[in-house]
């Protein structure tokens, strides 16, 4: 995966960031007959349908009620692939929602128009985000959260370390958001949860938090995405992603309960692309399903496939957690089976 360019490190205006994310989504939706491989095109087509429906949820069901101008929306962001995909789509939709509104300014309230104009001329526009800090996090994740939230222009609140419920309570107080409002007047927090996550099968796109949680609306438009859709969109986007994925992680938790995914371990048989004769290898048939996306990444003229690059620096604090496992692993995107995604969320031996 690539690193940030100088231009990206020097901050873009909020309007430019929103436009950049909008261009990524539009470009993804326009992928068509350039793809000749049947299995690749079927993943891309499926992801395009999901992208369209996620955008519709944002544009029709979320942004009219919760948006940065009303100051009642935030995104829960932990640097993971799911919330990064959702963040890109959210920013793209903000661009579409406000840009369309600006185009039809006859019907616009003055404050909306002014805000859009300000977005074009000033760097800061409060795109609220919250990171619920947990104990013993990988330094790589913390660094990625820091860099990416700057890049996307987020105004990121980092909670004290604690349970999710307590951290969210703390965040509600910080934002002065009232829990007692009626449903659509409550604040909303975007969450990158998917149906394959624990207890998520029957969740709705928009629903109130459970009784014993601080009261706000959970905005969850990524629910129907599968692992393969997340990888396809994220790899095509050409955005820098958390480096742990390159090293064989597929789901990110703390250093004490997250290891690389055993299904990605390189074995003699899966390196040759053969199936193990004894059938015991859990990682046979591993290959990169996203070669096309790598080769045609958004905005890239570089056709090299760096999909197996490993770039962890020796002086990283995470080194001891990463390098005492001497086995080689395929990168996270070699795994597309949702049921195996969380196999690395386990006790470290
Ligand atoms: P992941 O798959 O990594 O996380 C799924 C998504 O949760 C991420 O994409 C991100 O948007 C968010 N998230 C996870 N960890 C963090 C973090 N440390 N900081 C910021 N965002 C994070 N559970 C209930 O039982 N009832 C509830 O009402 C409820 N409300 C919630 C409201 C919010 C805002 C959040 C963030 C979580 C809530 N949860 C609730 C917990 C939720 O259902 C998941 O259990 C939790 O997000 C962890 O998911 P995961 O382990 O699958 O991690």
Image: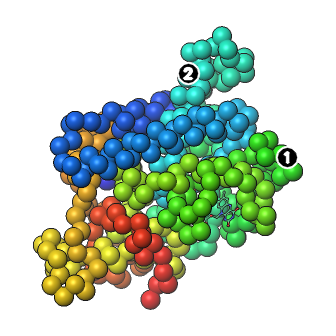
Confirm or deny contact between disc 2 and disc 1 (CB under 8 A).
Answer: no
Question: Any mark on residue 200, and which?
Answer: none
Query: Residue 71's spot in the image, x, y percent?
Result: 73, 38
Residue 124, quarter of picture = top right
Q: Is residue 15 above or below residue 137?
A: above
Q: Which residue is drawn at 44% across and 45% down?
A: 50
Residue under numbered circle 1: 181
Q: Residue at x 50, y 35 (%)?
A: 92
Q: Which residue is drawn at 60% across and 61% down?
A: 202
Element type where label 2 sits in the image: helix
Q: Label 2, label 1: how many angstroms apart (C-alpha)?
A: 30 Å
Lower sequence index among marks 2 and 1? 2
Query: Residue 46's spot in the image, x, y percent?
Result: 37, 47
Which quadrant holds the C terminus?
bottom left
Question: Any mark on residue 100, and which?
Answer: 2
Q: Which residue is drawn at 78% across and 60% down?
A: 214
Give the crowd class for mark 2: few <14, some 14-19, many >=20 residues within 10 Å.
few
Q: Please state the quadrant of the image where ligand 1 appears.
A: bottom right
Query: Residue 238's spot in the image, x, y percent?
Result: 34, 45
Work out which residue is located at the far front of the displayed protein and give it.
202
Q: Is residue 336 above or below residue 284?
A: above
Give the crowd class for mark 1: few <14, some 14-19, many >=20 residues within 10 Å.
few
């Amino acid at each position: 995966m690539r690193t940030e360019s100088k231009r990206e490190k020097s901050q873009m205006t909020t309007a430019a960031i929103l436009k950049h994310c909008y261009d990524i989504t539009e470009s993804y939706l326009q992928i068509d007959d350039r793809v000749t491989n049947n299995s690749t095109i079927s993943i891309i087509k499926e992801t395009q349908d999901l992208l369209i429906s996620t955008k519709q949820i944002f544009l029709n069901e979320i942004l009219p009620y919760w948006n940065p101008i009303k100051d009642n929306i935030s995104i829960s962001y932990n640097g993971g692939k799911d919330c990064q995909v959702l963040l890109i789509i959210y920013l793209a939709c903000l661009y579409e929602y406000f840009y369309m509104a600006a185009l039809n300014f006859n019907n616009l309230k003055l404050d909306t128009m002014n805000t859009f104009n300000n977005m074009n001329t000033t760097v800061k526009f409060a795109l609220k985000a919250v990171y619920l800090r947990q104990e013993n996090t990988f330094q790589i994740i913390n660094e990625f959260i820091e860099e990416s939230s700057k890049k996307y222009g987020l105004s990121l609140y980092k909670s004290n370390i604690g349970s999710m419920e307590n951290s969210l309570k703390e965040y509600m107080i910080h934002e002065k958001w009232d829990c007692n409002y009626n449903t659509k007047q409550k604040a909303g927090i975007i969450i990158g949860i998917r149906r394959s996550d624990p207890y998520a099968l029957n969740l709705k796109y928009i629903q109130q938090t459970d009784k014993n949680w601080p009261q706000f609306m959970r905005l969850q438009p990524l629910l129907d995405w599968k692992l393969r859709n997340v990888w396809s969109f994220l790899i095509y986007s050409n955005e820098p992603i958390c480096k742990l994925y390159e090293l064989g992680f597929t789901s990110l938790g703390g250093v004490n309960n997250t290891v690389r995914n055993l299904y990605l371990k390189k074995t003699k048989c899966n390196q040759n692309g053969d199936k193990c004769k004894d059938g015991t290898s859990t990682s046979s048939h591993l290959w990169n399903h996203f070669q096309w996306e790598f080769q045609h990444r958004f905005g890239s003229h570089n056709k090299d496939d760096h999909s197996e690059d490993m770039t962890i620096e020796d002086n990283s604090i995470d080194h001891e957690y990463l390098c005492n496992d001497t086995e080689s692993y395929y990168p996270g995107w070699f795994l597309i089976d949702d049921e195996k995604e969380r196999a690395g969320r386990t006790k470290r031996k």
